[in-house]
Image (cartoon, rainbow, N blue to C red):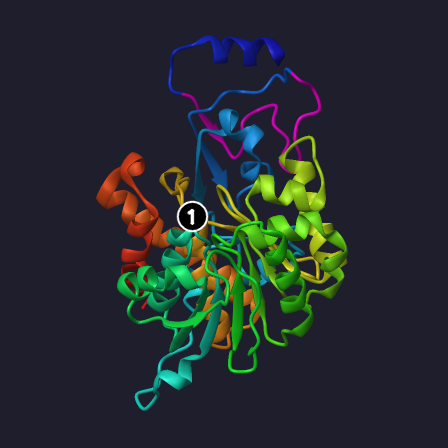
Amino acid sequence: MVSIIDFINSLDNQVISIDIPSGLMGDKLFDTKVPKIIHANNTLSIAFPKQVFFLAEATKYIGVWHHIDIGISEMYQQMVAAEAYFIERKDVVHMLNPRNKFSHKGTYGHALLIAGSSSKMGAAVMASKAAMRTGLGLLTTHIPKSAVDILQISSPETMLSIDKNAYYFSGIDLLSNYNAIGVGPGLGLNKESHIALKILIQNANTPMVFDADALNILSENKTWLSFLKAGSILTPHPKEFERLAGKSNNSEERIELQKQFSIKHKIIIVLKGANTSITTPDGKHFYNSTGNPGMATAGSGDVLTGIILSLLAQSYDPQTAAILGVYIHGLAGDISAIENGFESLIASDIIDNIGKAFISLY
């Protein structure tokens, strides 16, 4: 068998694997540094994708994978316990709340976004605009005093809460007016911001989303994780997650660490990347089907924070807000890639296409 694999891999032909490339295990990574595995250009996966398809180290063996439906009954699928779930359009269309003809802006929630510092106001702008594009009724963004003109000009739909400090987040008093709180995009790492974040965590009684510098501050103060409200959503990229939860040797170990971290701290982790991985306090695990390499660009994560915050404030439960938010974010990115290509895609394009993403789900 090994000689056949070596021979096929030596050819210049296009290689198509049926179900899974020979030599690759379906549910875990290989355990040698130089495994003997077919290098497929395309993999035709029968019935369901395999867990290994979502691990970065296996990509070079799988190529592009395609789902082949062989008619396995829906009843049987519901009976079999799943290790993870692959979120597709058919799953999210049922999550969307219909809009009532006689609703008003108060119907769709009031969110508080705490974001921005003297050199990172773009993050606050993008998160704010993304939140408003995702159906939110009202948004208040808390920003440093020096940034008022920037946000009022760039996002006129956004109301402002103005920090007493001119350059960074130093605290906020009134929290009772909001249905959800998001914190982190462009926040900075000033020591006074550390203290302000701790007080915020202790005083907030609404669902929260933590991203970017809020995660970096938490990683320097890990005891604060015990103060997080159950169901809080954390949206790290792999390096931010490593700082929070510790190192792992490969993506398989990182996913397992992600699951255990969610369970231990009773939080939802949105681990950003290809097929963004979402884990929940009850041990469930979801992979997203939308998104593309063009979204690996500055500000993309800030847009995701705004989207998820908006959904939370509209009374979507945290798990649904995370799953639906990640799917819409990736779908808007896919529409942007069609219009601009991977190389030219920027985060503002994703915001501009959130509306088209929603339309495609109706």
Q: Position of residue 42 (x, y in %)?
A: 42, 29
Query: Along the horizontal axis of the image, is 201 left or right of 293?
Result: right
The reply, left or right, for residue 28 in relation to residue 359 is right
Residue 6 location in percent, x, y? 55, 10
- The stretch drawn in magenta includes residue 306: no
Give the position of the C terminus as an image quadrant: bottom left
Which residue is at the front of the view, 100 or 19? 100
The magenta span reads 15-33
Quarter of the image where the N terminus is located: top right
Residue 203 horizontal side relative to residue 292, left or right: right
Considering depth in this image, is 301 or 257 the residue closer to the camera?
301
Compared to 328, does 273 lie above or below? above
Farthest residue toward the bottom? 102
- Is residue 181 left or right of 80 when viewed as pictured? left
Callout 1: few (<14), some (14-19), or many (20+) C-alpha neighbours within 10 Å? few
User: What secondary structure prevails in the magenta region?
Assistant: loop
Asked whether residue 189 appears in the rendered view, the answer is: yes
Q: Is residue 201 above or below residue 67?
A: below
Q: What secondary structure is marked by label 1? A: loop
Which residue is identified by label 1? 119
Q: Amino acid at mark 1?
A: Ser
Percent x, y for residue 148?
A: 36, 64
Task: Work out whether residue 223 or residue 276 is closer to the camera in this orientation and state it.
Answer: 223
Q: Is residue 22 magenta?
A: yes
Q: Position of residue 43 (x, y in %)?
A: 46, 32
Residue shown at 47%/66% (left/top)? Answer: 113
